[in-house]
Image (cartoon, rainbow, N blue to C red):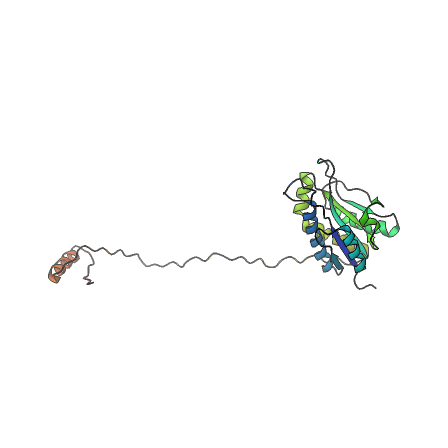
Amino acid sequence: MKLAYKIYLSPSNQSANKYASGSTNEMSQCDKIAVAAESALKRCGFSVKLGKSGDTMQNRCKESDAFNADIHMPIHTNAFDGKTTGGTLVMLYKSSTEHNKAGKCLLDAVGKISPGKDYTLRYRTDLYELNTPNAMSLYLEVEFHDTKTGSDWIRNNIENIGEAIAKGMCNYFGVNYIAKKASTDTAQTKPVTPPTTDKKTLYYVQVGAFSNKANATALIEKLKKSGFDAIIKTK
């Protein structure tokens, strides 16, 4: 039994493809999806290599071959007419038992969560990242980014897409999917309330100053007779 299947992730370098919402682009979001997929795949026991952001397809394919990848996976988001939210598309170099099995596992997992109606598996021999790598290439188009519905969904579901990619690969290779553990750090810091006291606030009033102590004493006596608490203080 093979100890660890190898998957090379090649996120889109197409920064000029703008999203319909969020002031972002295809490269930025696919980089995030690839990072999420890398984390999920490694958790499930896969060996993963992630292509450098913005790198060329040529360099990616060379790295994939040097890595001796079992699967080469370009990750893209799609676009058409700005009106079509079209779901997930998986493209393959050829139709064979293994290609179809792997492609369907990926399509079923990602397509299950994407909002648009999914495509059937497609076959193309003209795409560089399908016809060049030594590994089986699964070219993933995750939903359409040129509609607000598709764009919003992609941006808000980065981690879910990454997990779906891992689930698809687990299904294909017969590996147990290991879900991400829920965070146990739920403690919240409560604001500290100053302790209250029963002490009354006292207000001190100065009513006069005398150079002759006898005059000061006479005033004190008058105040005390009137119910005031009075003392003599020297400075």
105 displayed left or right of 32: right
Above or below residue 82? Residue 65 is: below
- Which image quadrant: the C terminus? bottom left
Which of the image's four quarters has the N terminus?
bottom right
Residue 146 in percent (x, y) is at 70, 39
Q: Is residue 94 left or right of residue 194?
A: right
In the rendering, at what x and y percent does residue 114 appear? 72, 44
Q: Front-most of 65 and 143? A: 65
| 212 relative to 34, above or below | below
Most distant residue in the right direction: 96
Q: Residue at x 72, y 56 (%)?
A: 38
Regarding residue 104, the answer to whether it shows in the image is no
Closer to us: 140 or 115: 140
> Residue 134 occupies which quadrant of the picture?
bottom right
- Visible residue check, residue 25: yes
- Could you tell whether 37 is left or right of 125 in the image? left
Q: Position of residue 163 (x, y in %)?
A: 71, 53
216, 184: nearer the viewer: 216
Number of on-image labels:
0
